[in-house]
Image (cartoon, helix red, strand yellow):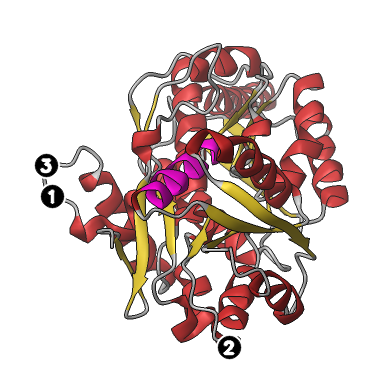
Amino acid sequence: MNSRIKWWTVAWAAGWLVLSATLSTAVAGTIKVGAIFAVTGPASFLGGPEARSAEMVVEKINKAGGINGDTIELIIKDSAGSTEKAVSFAKQLIEEDKVVAIIGPSTSGESMAVKKIAEDGKTVLISCAAAEVIVNPVASYVFKTPQKDSFAAQMIFEEMQRLKIDTIAIASGNDGFGKAGKEQLEKMAPAFGIKVAASETYDSKATDLSALVAKLKADASIQAVINWSVVPAQAIIAKNMRQAGWQVPLFQSHGFGNIEYAKAAGAAAEGIIFPCGRLLVVDALPDTHPQKALLSQYKSEYEARYKEDASAFGGYAFDAMNIVAEGIRQAGNDRAKVRDAIEGLSNFPGVGGMFTFSPQDHNGLTIDSFAMLTVKDGKFVLYQGK
């Protein structure tokens, strides 16, 4: 073989390698999805399970061959519950990382801070926080997976009516979730014939709420307390109430949906009543329940992998990641088309319920996605009434 033939052979081989790499990239690309979770900090009970659940979903998708041959790259940012960090990360994910969508943030305050950024950047945001104001009014690119706080308030008030409770106190954290829930409770109470005798806000970082409890207990007309928060303080208020010998019923929001909160409250958690998705009581569901198979699968896979109890919060991220994946499956790596695909999803099965989105509804769940639960012997069980 002369030198000219050798040169041609090497050039051809090099060209083929370049062409092969190009074809390989075209066939198997990478689609970036961002995530903003409070993995550390006071809201880590939310963000930790969310990050782990999202990672589990992505790993499973990629092991099965990805989506339409493309691999999902999940870029997780730890906001530690800081709105400032959430805003910075959202901008980075949209402008620098060029993600097709963002799941999270973990808290309502962060989600509200990021909402306009996602909208301006025409990038899907699927919040894992519960405040209804995240999706009401509807913003084109913003969705959320937790059930509406107005549904939670309604279920609590309906149970109070059954218990003939007509005078209550509200305690709420001073974060976005607490403020939004407080507004819903105060607005909706009169329609159920319930008087709000006191409505107090506390520092979400509080480690002692005994003074607040003493103030509420001094009003003998108060028959029950609703606490609305998603921080460790919700376990503290339960302990302070029982330490003060105050035995009125304590209702919590769906923010109580992590067994770690009940463990933190100890014996004081017994009897707490709250609305939540059915993941926490999946074993009590009949086999014919439309959610049971998915709930059982998520719970068993999560607990086997991470050696901790599955929570409603992890379920919110599980749903958010699967919804984004379905949008990508239908529409590819185009932000606007993925948005359209998500808005068109109907009867999409999730841990939180069956999602049916529309231009008017970016939460996609009905009140039936909730069940009333209580704490019995340190465990979450279906509430049977009193």
Q: Quadrant of the C terminus?
A: bottom left
Residue at x 53% of width, y 72% of height? 261
Query: What's the residue type where badge 1 is placed?
Result: Pro
The mark lying in front, picked from 2 and 1, is 2
Does the magenta segment cover residue 149?
Answer: yes
The mark lying in front, picked from 3 and 2, is 2
For the record, the magenta segment spans 147-161
| Residue corresponding to mark 2 | 243
| Residue corresponding to mark 3 | 288
**Between residues 1 and 319, which one lies in front from this camera angle?**
319
**Disc on res. 358:** none
**Above or below 238: residue 55:** above
CB under 8 Å between callouts 1 and 3? Answer: yes
On the image, the x and y values in percent for residue 119 come to 76, 22
**Between residues 184 and 132, which one lies in front from this camera angle?**
184
Q: Main secondary structure of the magenta part?
A: helix
